[in-house]
Amino acid sequence: MGVLILSSLLQQCGGILTILRKAKPLVHHITNYVTVNDCANMTLAIGASPIMADAIAEAEDIARLSSALVLNIGTLNSSTIASMLVAGKAANEKNIPIILDPVGAGASTLRNDTVARILREVYISVVRGNISEVRFLAGLSSNTKGVDASAADEMDNAADVAQRVARMFHCVVAITGAVDTIADAERVVHIRNGHPMMADVTGTGCMCSSLVGSFCGASPDWFEATAAAVLCMGIAGELAFETAGQNGTGSFRVALLDAVSRMNQNTMEERGRING
């Protein structure tokens, strides 16, 4: 992307945040119990409204009421798998964006079978994962280390992997890491915001997926919305380190939420580092 186009994208990202804060989209989560509270708080911090509804008796109804649906496979069981499929199909009927966080894809047969079934039966709008997880979705060899990306996979060309998955599933793909890569079938951008300390707090990837759901719930352009969410998370990581990084990971975690709650369009435009 040219400099002018990237500058315009940066402005669009900030603009979506302003729209989000006014619209307060309802974001339905079927997510994992390790990070569910942080995901709810992150959704609130950005100005959206979370609802954590994983019972199959209400999953379809809640999905239809929502502006976005986040499916996170971090802690799977047979009940939540069924709820994900029901909610996903209901969201598809209403053209509600669905964000898939394939936590630990490649690590176990249950995760692998589940993510394959979701991708087969539900149209996914955005995939947000680390490089190892997205490599697995691409059908490439993957060195998933539990729920973390492996160092070997991080050496790969993330843009090629992201676009491969984007074309396979007709979706937007966000690979988050030291440098974040956002892609669809035609466009690729890299975001160079963030701080290494984010990797020391469990659930920052899950929280980022909640931000993606929040931004996508406020914008019909899911590529721009995903870029805005990832940019917001990266900048928040930098601000959190500046504010509380020297105090340890607990203080950093709280400061991360604080930074998102105080995020505004000017901060995103001034601090954002996006390149093609």
Image: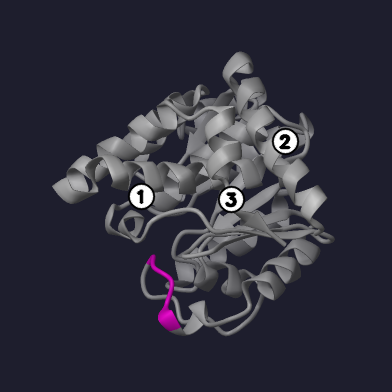
Residue at x-position 77% and y-position 33%: 220
The foreground one among 164 and 98 is 164
Horizontal and vertical percent position of residue 33: 33, 43
Report the disc number at residue 100. Answer: 3
Residue at x-position 66% and y-position 35%: 216
Say which element carries label 2: helix
Q: Which sits earlier in the primary sequence, circle 2 or circle 1?
A: 2
Which three-letter amino acid code belongs to the residue tagged 3?
Answer: Leu
Which three-letter amino acid code belongs to the residue tagged 2?
Answer: Gln
Q: Which sits earlier in the primary sequence, circle 1 or circle 3?
A: 3
| Part of the protein shown in magenta | 147-151
Q: What residue is shown with label 1?
A: 203
Say which element carries label 3: strand
Label the magenta part by its dominant secondary structure: loop
Mark closer to the observer (2, 3): 2
Q: What residue is shown with label 2?
A: 12
Residue at x-position 35% and y-position 61%: 196
Mark closer to the observer (1, 3): 1
